[in-house]
Amino acid sequence: MAAVVGTVAGVLGSYMRKEWGPAFGKLAAGMLVLFVFANYGTFLGWFEDTLAGGAPSEPADSPPQDSDGPSLWLPLALAAGGLVVSFGLYGLWNVVQRRRAREAARRRTAAAAQTRRHAIEAEHDEVRDAYAAYVCDVLAVLDRPALDDVTVPQTAALLHAMDAAADARRGSDLDAYRQAVSTLKTAWRAADEHARKTGVRDLPAQERSAVAKARRLFEKALDERGSQHERQAAHAKARALLDGVLTLPRQAVAAVEHHTRPALAKGATA
């Protein structure tokens, strides 16, 4: 039994290391050892007879001896069994290793995809934050009104790109998301640069004058150093000047009201 276990272990170890020559050598050596052990009595008798110089004399009442010679079936069977077990264990080991390799590759792929998604989302958020800062800043809107004008081609392209990137973000296709964010970044740069270059020069002279006055009034309304009455009056005049000239984003209106409301509320309760 020890010889069988040793043979199986040796052959299996060589298989795992893909050492085919040593594997078959160990198998042959194991078979030889098993053959010797299985026919130990026969070989011992033959050796004693050889030393005695002749055939041994058998007692009269002794049973007939098997004259077929050394038995080959037992070592061959043990060797075949050991070989089958070796290949079976090796196959099982390969299955386990392949499964572990696939799982490790899956984890690496998932981690890489997550890292890539975070990077794309960071670029997406950068554009979203820049646009949000614009629409919440009434002074920026008055300086770059084209960036809020959907009739301007660059602005229309920006809004479409923002919607496409938002849809891609909700999906699982990172390549499509990457492309959508790249398109969004390009559209943002084009729309912002166009709005900065254009300013208010496309407006008629009278409307440009109204926008300039409204901007100064909004600055006064947002200045917390002013009195409550002055800030309230400036806010109302600025909104009246822009009526029919520019439509402010609701975010910008809410931001101005957020800054002026505490002062107005305080003045009402004073």
Image (cartoon, rainbow, N blue to C red):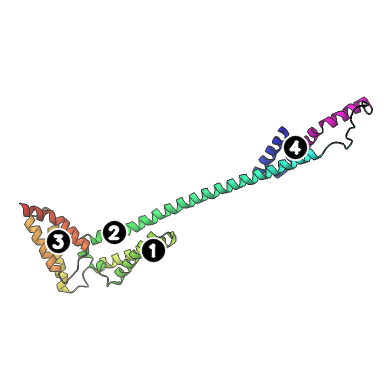
Question: Residue at the location (48% across, 52% down)?
Answer: 109
Instruction: Label 1: state its secondary structure.
Output: helix
- Left or right: residue 89 versus residue 110 is right
Q: Residues within 10 Å of mark 2 (few under 14, many from 20)?
A: few
Could one spot residue 186 in this view of the protein?
A: no
Helix, strand or loop at disc 4?
helix
Residue that numbered label 4 is attached to: 30
Q: Which residue is under mark 1?
A: 180
Q: Nearer the viewer, mark 4 or mark 3?
A: 4
Question: Which amino acid, mark 2?
Answer: Ala
Residue at x 18%, y 62% (from the top left corner): 253
Q: Is residue 186 above or below residue 228?
A: below
Question: Can residue 257 be seen from the camera position used here?
Answer: yes
User: Which of pointers 2 and 1 lies earlier in the amino acid sequence?
Assistant: 2
Q: Amino acid at mark 1?
A: Ala
- The mark nearer the N terminus, 4 or 2, is 4
Q: At numbered mark 2, what does the secondary structure look like: helix, strand or loop?
A: helix
Which is closer to the viewer, label 4 or label 1? 4
* Contact flag, marks 2 and 1 (Cβ < 8 Å): no
Residue 162 at what x, y percent from top left? 33, 64
Residue 254, numbered circle: none
Q: Is residue 177 magenta?
A: no
Decide whether residue 41 is among the magenta residues: yes
